[in-house]
Each structure stands twice: as C-alpha cells, then as structure tokens.
Image (tube, coloured by chain):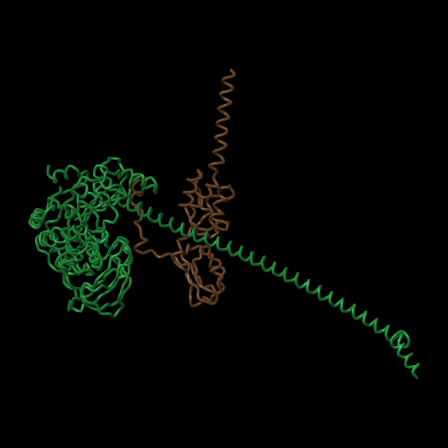
Chain colours: A green, B brown
Amino acid sequence: MSLTDAARRLFRGGVHPEQHKAESTHTPIGSADMPERLLLPLHQHIGEPAEALFAPGDRVLKGQTIARANGYVSAPLHAPTSGTVLGIGEHPVPHPSGLVAPCMVIEPDGEDRWIDHAGHDDYASIDPVALRNIIREAGIVGLGGAGFPTYIKLNPGHHKPIETLILNGAECEPYITCDDMLMRERAAGIVSGLAIVRHALQAKEALIGIEENKPEAIAAMRAAVAGLEGVRVVPVPTIYPAGDSKLLSRILTGKEIPSNKLSAHVGITCVNVGTTYAVHRAIAHGEPLLSRIVTVTGGAVAQPRNLETLLGTPMDALLRQCGTRMAAIDRLIMGGPMMGIALHRADLPVIKTTNCVLAAAAAELLPQRPAMPCIRCGACSDACPMNLLPQQLYWHARNKDLDKVQKFDLFDCIECGACSYVCPSNIPLVQYFRYAKGDIWIQEREKEKAQLARRRHDARQARIEREKAEREAKRQQKKAALDAASARERAQAEAQSARQRAEERRDVAMQQVQKQRTVPAEGTEPAATEKNEKNRAAD
Amino acid sequence: MLTAVLALSGLALVFGLSLGYAAIRFRVEGDPLVEKIDALLPQTQCGQCGFPGCRPYASAIASGEADINQCPPGGETTILALADLLDRDPKPLNPDNGAIKPKTLAVIDEQRCIGCTLCIQACPVDAIVGAAKQMHTVVAAECTGCDLCRPPCPVDCIEMVPVQQDIRTWKWPFPEQKTAEHAR
C-alpha cells in the first residue's frame, strides 16, 4: 500500500470547501513594487517582541538587523531594503484584535544596498548548533502561518532523536497558492533547505507532503529530490485541513502526537516549504528573512497572482499592483477563508506570517448568517479531524465551564473551522473555542500573578516580623546594657558615697583629734609638758 | 456467645488503636480549608473585604465569620469558585465591600513625588521602590492595583491607571450576542 493510500485511510473528518486556487496560479511569481514606506511590526512571531536597535533618523542597509531577538522564544528583524528609519511607534498591525503595536517605519532610499553578507558552500561541514544559530540570526520563523521561531524546532533538545522530517507543502486552505508556486518554481532551493534542516536535526528520513491537487508542484519536487536517499514526495488527499502539522504528521507516519505534546515527542518535526526555502537562502546565500511570497487573490482582484513581497509592504499597495477595485472589497482577510483573520483596514503591513491577502467580493464567501440553536445533528463531530466532540465543547464553552471544556480536550483543537463550516445552524463553534482558550490562558496568567503577589506579601510579612523581632531584641539588649551600666554606676556611686562617708568620718575624727590637741594645750600633751617641766627646771 | 463478644471487642480494640495511631501519624498542621480558600483569592491584599489581607479573609470564611461575596477584585469568578469549593449558593458581590472595577495599576507622578516613603510602607507586595527624599516608582509587573498606596500620599501624586489592552493580553471575545437573540 502506498503512503498516499495510507494517508487517505488515516484521515478522518475534514471538509471539501471550494478550492479557488486556479485563479492565482496562471502567472509566475512576480515581485511586489517597492513601496514608499515599510512598516515593520516588532512582533511578527510567537514569543517575545524583538527589541529595536535603531533610532529615528538612522540609516540602515538591506539585511541589517534592525531589532534583536529578546529572549529564547523570539526572532530578530532585518531591514528589507536600505533606507532611513523614520520612526518607531504604535501602528495598526494585522491581528484579529485590530489593536496597535510597536512598529519601525523605514523609508527606502531606492538603492537597495546590501550589508556585507556571505553564504556557506558546504552546509554539511557546519556543526548543527552553528547552523541553528545562523537560522536564528536570520530571523526565520514558521512561514506557514504560525510564526514559531524555526531554530527552536530544529533543536531536538532532550527529546528522543528526530527520525522523520516532514516538509509541509499540503497547503489545504482555499485560495492560497504561495507554497504551490514556490514548489513549482524554486524546488531546488526548497530541497537544498530540506537537506540543511535534515542535517541540523540529523533526521533519518524526510517526507514531503503535497496535496494531490498540485500535480505540477508534485512533479517539480519529485524531479528535485531524484537521487536523494531517504527523501520521498508523498501526495496526500485533498481534504481540508490536511495541511495542519499535527494532522499531516499523523497521516504520513501513522503516529499520533499525544495531547499537550509537541511532534518532537514522537520523533517528528514538521516544517513548511516556504520556511525551508528561507533556510536555504540564509545558509547558502547568507540572506536573512526579508521577503516572502504572498498570494494576492479574491473576487475583487483583477489579476490574482503571487508576489515576492518585502516584509512591511502595505497590503493596499499589493492589492493595487494586482488591479484590485478597492471599493469592491467586501471582506479583506489575511490568510485563507477558513482560518484567516478578518482585517478592517487595507493599509496594514505584510508580516512574516502573511501567506495570502484575500480581497473577497460581495457574496463570494459564505455570508455570516445568524446562528440558530444547536439541533444536535453531530455533523461537527463527523467533520472534526482531531476526533473531538465540538458539540460538547460548545455547550461547555457557552456556559463558560472552563474545567469541562478542558476535560473534552479543548487544547487539542487546531481551530481549523471544519465544524463551523458544516454546522447547519451556523453556530460559530471555533469562535467559542478560541474564546474558551483565551479565557483559560488569562485565568492561568492571573493565577500566576496571584501566586507572585502572595509570595511577595508573605515575604513582606516575614520581613516585618523579623524587623520587629530584631528591634525588640535590640531594645532588650539596650535595656540590659542600661541596667548593667546603671548597676555599675550605682555601685560606683555607693563606693563614692562610702568613700565620702569614710572621708567625712575621718575628717570628723581628725577634727576631734585636733580639738583634743588644742583644748588641753597646756597640760594634756605629756611630751610638751615634760619639755616644759624640763625647761622650767633648767631655768 | 463469648467468642463473638471477644472477637468484636478485639476488632474494636485493633481499629481503635490503628485509628488513634493514624490520628497522630497523619496529623494535618493548620487548616487545609484556609489554604484552599486562600488559593482562590486574587492576592491583591487590598483589604476591601474588611480583613487585613487575603489570608485573614480566607480564615474568616473558613470559620464562618465572613461571607464569600466580599472580594471585589476577585469578582464573579472568585465568588463562583468559592461557592463551588464550599458547596454554597453563589450570590452577588456585597456592595458594602466595593464594586467590581477594571484592573488598574498604580502610577507615581515622579515630578511631584517628594520621597516621603509613606506609599512604600503601605504597599502590601513591596511593589514600590525608592528611599527617603528620593523619587519613588511603581514596579508595574508586581503591582496588584490594590489602591492602598494612594490614600497615604501627602501630595496626591499616585494615580490608578486602567491596564491597557495590547496584542499580547487581547483575547477572543465571547460570541454570545447573535446566538442569544436567535435562540429566543
């Protein structure tokens, strides 16, 4: 049995939304025009935001690090072209919240002058640790949509060794074709990156999963891997969401990733083809991640196509380049119609995770109909590719019963939206699950904060007690010292007074003696009397 | 007859001794219920419940002196959790203890601070740094927003600022509205 058949057998659930992929694959990958301004959010990845290294007015070169990674789970940011830093400030960013976030604004000088950079001819001679560092410094994060720093994925750490490297080229979301076009046109680069990643992980085999609806990409990749040992291109069934990394790992290897565990736990690492291509550019050419391929498509776009776009390019510039009637845009989405995020303005920048800008015309996507009560049909459970019970999760999430939703494995939900897609009552199931996840995270965070406050309060109480005890001890000591001192003083005073008394007594005695001497002056002194008598006799 | 009496007395003796031993051997120090209640409280140490801190309030609840609805910073979540733990009926927050307010942080206007250290002494979690006649400042990560530092300030330079939501603290809202309307 071929791996494709096995994958078909292992797939459970899933849906078949309309593809809409052909529109954007007629034209080869073009390059986006240089915009007037590049708006670079400092937080384009999972983890801590990067830390800006330049101030307004500074000049930067193409490829220069403009913001450094801040912590382990973080990624640096590079200047996509040479120019001047106009400022660092809060600007709207592509995020479901529609909030602002710190961004660096760069005005291109048009010269596109590179910083000194050089690639490595032979990746195999580089130590895996050094390879990971180059990938980290190149700011590469998962380009499939998650934005997780790639170098962490390539660090197997203390998990069991990685046996299988999975290259994700499934691209199951409707409309998006950036990975498809990349595989068709730049298969050699992807395979070079695959070899580097495989070397970094020391993985035994590599499987390239591509949905069956991309025959050109499959052919191109097959041609590129010909002759490579342990690398296989596996067409996977065209069912949404075959491109989810957990699901792809399962259908390609038959290994289920345990709840709350990473794929590395079962010896698998899954990397997107775009990410692999970026790794190739970083190692072989010394180029950090400056641009990505973005699918610009949708009913409002006259010439849907893929464009190699500098990070920070405003989406409206891309849309205009593809001849979009801006007034005809009904819904603007970053990503696909299933998992993408709705944007409420078009001047948001392209970031590392922007795989598609979808400008849908009116009535093109399923309208957001009002939700009706759940009729318990169970269609959601049939559609769920992760074997969850969306109906049960929905009840508990709706009742805000956060313990129960976790018992029904909420955190195994990949938020693919298959359940919402099939729901005959139009219940926005995924939104409930996202809400519940967010609420649980916030509660966890608050609990942690409470723990911290408790520790600090206890420490303060202990300190106050200690200080009090110390003060008391000091007081006691002082008192004792004082007592001792006063006792000594008293003793001294007593001695003094005794001495005084003694002296007084002696004085009194002396006086008495003197008195006695003076009173019987003519008679009482025998010697004198004798003398006198003698004197008298002599006379 | 005698065998039965002896057997039962023997059993009673054995069980009595083992229970007595267990009571000494596995004695629980302190009241575990207080610990459990304290773990549910938000640890702001603000004293709005009428007790000097979260732990005293926890022991007051455990001993039945205080009700479970006296903690404004904890709000509905804490009341529900306490009701769940103690198997009591949840009730709305007691308005005498204050109202549920959005989370705040203390911010010192450093231009106006005279360095009197009164706020430092008032802070229950040591979140204010400074020294006598030196400017003071609040360590935002440690501040619980309890509002205890504000009253003692002689120059009113401390302000409670609502915590701003940013991308990292944002969460998906509850999608209730549309459903509820149509469920009726």
| In the image: residue A200, left or right of residue B92 | left
The furthest residue to the bottom = A539
The quarter holding residue A345 reads bottom left
Q: In which quarter of the image is the C terminus of chain A?
A: bottom right
Could you say where residue A164 lies in the image, as x and y percent from the top left?
17, 45
Could you say where residue B113 lies in the image, as x and y percent from the top left?
45, 66
The furthest residue to the top = B1
Report whether residue B128 is seen.
yes
Report whether residue A299 is seen.
no
B67 w.r.t. B5: above or below: below
The quarter holding residue A476 reads bottom right
| Residue at screen point 20% across, 61% down | A312
| Residue at screen point 36% across, 47% down | A443
- Give the camera-side residue of A516 and A40: A516
The quarter holding residue B159 reads bottom left
Could you say where residue B145 lies in the image, as x and y percent from the top left?
42, 55
